[in-house]
Amino acid sequence: MNLSALVENLYANTIASLDLFRPELILCATIVAMLLVRIIAGTRVPAALVALIGAGLGFYFSLPFGDEPIVRTEIFTGLLVYDGFTVFFRAILLFFAVLFVIFTQLSGIPDREDAPDFYSLVLGGTVGMCLMASANHLLMIFLAVEMASVPSYVLAGILKGRRQSSEAAIKYVVYGAGAAGVMLYGVSLLAGVLGSCHLPTMAAELANRLAADTLGESAMVLVLGGLMLGVGLAFKLSAFPFHFWCPDVFEGAAAEINAFLSIASKAAALALLVRVVVGFGHVPAENAPASVIAAAASTSSQDGYFAIADDETTRDSAAPETQRAALAPVRDFMLLLVAVLAAVTCTFGNLAAYGQTNIKRLMAYSTIAHAGYMMMPVAAALALSSQNTRAAEAAFAAIPFYVGIYLFMNLGAFAIIAFLRNELKSEEIDDYSGLVRRSPGVVVCFSVILFSLVGLPPLAGFAGKYVIFASLVDAMAIPGARLTMIALLVIGGLNTALSLFYYVRVVKVMTLDDERDTRAPASFSLASIPGAFVALVTIPVFVLGLFWNELYQVAAGATTTLFG
Amino acid sequence: MSNVIWFTSAIVFLPAIVAMLIWIIVPRDKHDAMRWISLGATVVVFLMTAWMLFQNGEEGQFTAGVADMQNTFSLPWISSFNIYYMMGTDGISFPLVVLTSFLSMLAMAASWNITKHVKAYCILYLLLETGMLGVFLALDFFLFYVFWEVMLLPMYFLIGVWGGPRREYAAIKFFLYTLFGSVLMLIAILMLYFQSDLNLLTAEQLAEAHVAPGYSTPHTFNILALQKIGQLQNSPFSEELLWGRSLQWWAFLLLFIGFAIKVPAVPLHTWLPDAHVEAPTPISMILAGVLLKMGGYGIIRICYPICPEGGYELAWFVCAVGVVSMVYGAFAAMAQKDFKRLVAYSSVSHMGYVVLGLGVWSAAAGNQYDPYYWALGMNGAMFQMIAHGISSAGMFFLVGVLYDRVHHRNLDEFGGLFGRMPVYSGIAIVIFFAGLGLPGLCGFIGEVMVTLSVWNYSQALAVISAAVVILTAGYILWTIQRVYLGPEYKGPHGDHLTAMTNREIAIAAPLVVFAILFGVYPQVVFNYMEPSVTRSVEELAEWTHAVKDTPAPPTGVAVSTPPSDSIAAD
């Protein structure tokens, strides 16, 4: 293949890929537009409006229209992958962006002057998160993580002149930079041993070496590289022991930023975790690097794409099975790692939440605990994927499903915290005492959200937890993983009971305790625009608890293309 | 069919709908209006369930003397997991449904003393009633679980806001215990779900379990289908799960712990004295009269029929738990100084009979597979639940009446009430004797049936359980002596000891009537209850006979237990 052919391929590939990359392009255009509007129209056109339109358009174009089933397609010469999972997470991230812009406008952070910067950062971070959810290449993983993180660092410190906020930002930066460095080192180790950064190629190479038993001493390097990559992921997930930034950042940063970090960032990190474990634990049918370019070049015609893939499989039909079997030790390693991290993170988050007096710190630990819960189905899916990828897909479906529910729960919680901060000028749990007397509607909404976070039926949080536990029980059928799954199930169950205590404490303070004299006599009614926003976000928590079949089917559909 | 759907759904959801209406429409300061509306809702629900008792052959009524599930319907709810909105009644659940609606009505009438945050109280109370009725009517395991948990939140607030001095502690303790139990239950439910396989059942069995043909996955939450799968000779639930124990064994254990917390059985009972003592009077009535029955109901409906092997192997454990609860509860009751705490511990003791009666049911003494004694114990346990629902709700109400007047419950500071409040004392003595198990009152029937059935299983246990009657007589007679007899009342607020109001008498009188009626003519209950209970026992007896007596067929073909025909002859 000569140079001109390469360039031609690259050109065709890029043009074909751009079509599937529309939502991200819209976001990028919105960012530019937002900065330009300020120059052209001064401050007459609010940046929030531009951001809202941009995010809304992005969301609209991220939705899969048409009846054609989405097939796994590698785009940009294999850097990214476009499949149902990408579509789902992109849609949910952009949906969140729309809600987030509305929320921040209602809560008054950012002010008019900061708004263009603020929304550029938010949308820029969202682009990075969309890339995280669709990454298929180690370099892309690193770039996406950085692209999502750097705006978050700035956002954490957006409250200028507030000491705590700056402290949060600097802590976040230092911690994030360290984690990124370690992760980059891990990436280089993995790439160095396996000779590629393209995940399917790496998996195929790894499978071949494992099957031929030629790994030798480089196995140690791979384990080390894998662990280092895991550090970067654990940092984004705020998994133990890389969670230390989380409570401090959450306490220092504004509640709005907490919502962004705990929902969008967490969703993207989970998607990335799924991409990594699937990428290393499974070789898709079309794994040869040569076919990627050729296949991607013809993405415009799906038939041709499939034809090539079919050629591959017919040429070497036994290959995927043997490769899948050869990767068993890799999957076992990742299973153990994820299971231990999930169990420890979940337990630690719940235990540490007990002593908190600041509602944002409490929610930070709650976020950590939920990261633990949401990692559990990854372990279950890894166990199942050694036998049956269909069952593994069903187990993975618990993650998009939970994320869909978690979005409403946490957005509702942080919206209430932000609006109450505006009224009470406080984020201490004690200052919420007796709130039910003056603001009964909001207390009912907050209680619904908190009980949903515990996982009590008939609220949506229960459906999410139910699906997670279901994936674990399903994986108990795999004899090798049975004990691990039972252990995770017991830990998850105990944690659910434990977590009740601190969530209920907040409810108790709001409802059972008497009002404080020292607190400003403020009230926050549902019959206001912020109140309506709170109610609108809380209603899905209730409705999805009763009728979650549709959301589950969407989530299950999103994971059916994961394994290619 | 669709009438049945609407009728049953109305029974369950009417209270919740009324609660929503109160929330939206009624202004916060119209206390009496809210009370009357709530009472009206509970009365309507009671009348609907009472109408089912009649035998006019109309659609929706419950036909007595039939063992089958009646008025069953099943609508798809969450198809991804084969979850249905499925409800129905049989002789096991129907008496408990009527008991629930009856006690809910009485307890609402007893709620006039609640003056703090009346609106929130009425809303939560009605939501609680929806949860309780749903538990007894649900036939889908997932739906059952949802209703089971729906009760928790209202109960937490009802104890936590309107309770006594240590209400917050009691409320969170109740919440934590029950949530812990229900998490275990959820794990067991999921294990059974993923192991279940509808393809093992014959078309006839599927029709009996109301499974719609054309199911997408072979897994099911249908309680009836799970029962049939669990009682197959080569049940998929019998596969080994962990440490040499079958999945059934583990599922039984998890479910039993979950239900035993609710019953409550020693040593998982410690939430009960706190919750009962701190809860306001009407909520104590509901707790003792209805919530405790859910544990027993779960054991009968779910534990044994779905996991017979677990029940068979753990029979000694269940019986031991029952006997220990009886003895411990009785001794603890004897040691109490607080009147309400004494009644609470008496509940632990009395519910021990239920656990024992159910536990004996699964045991086969020697190689006898005669279901007669099992059926006796099981029917006794069921009857004991109804009887205890009447007597314990009555006892808590009567303690509440006294507390409303003198604002203390110290047993040592009472005495001489017979002279001051003769009507009240007369009612109280009937109710307390019913709790004691005096022949001719409702408590006697269940206790004697359980004790008789235990004799065939273990004579030692029978002797102990008979001896508990003496302990019970001891603490109840001693209580009556300390509270009602004696020369005069010397405690505080003596001048407030006024006669019972008409409202209070109206609440207590029906309880007295039923305590006597059920004691004299227990057939009233057994007519509805006995066929279903006996059939469950016979099915399990056949299962035990087939599985434990003869070697399982060598091939992997599932041989189903034929449905029992002996009901008609019974």
Image (cartoon, coloured by chain):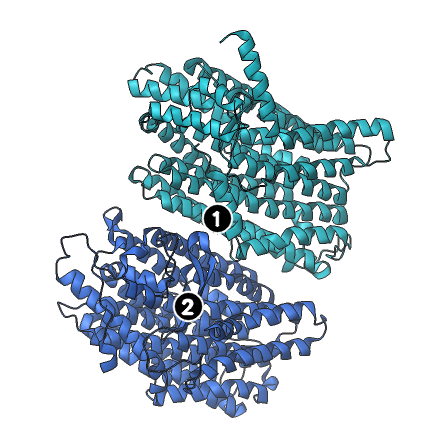
Chain colours: A cyan, B blue
Q: Amino acid at mark 2?
A: Met
Q: Amino acid at mark 1?
A: Lys
Mark 2 or 1, closer to the camera: 1
For residue B64, what is the image quadrant?
bottom left
Q: Which residue is mark 1?
A: A465
Residue A238 visible? The answer is no
A358 lies left or right of B541: right
Residue at left 38%, top 19%? A205
Residue at left 16%, top 61%? B548
Chain containing mark 2: B
Nearer-the-camera pick, B471 or A307: A307
Residue A213 visible? The answer is yes
Residue A237: x and y in percent read 54, 33
* Label at residue B294: 2
Residue B476: x and y in percent read 39, 80
* Quarter occupied by the C terminus of chain A: top left
SS for dot 1: helix
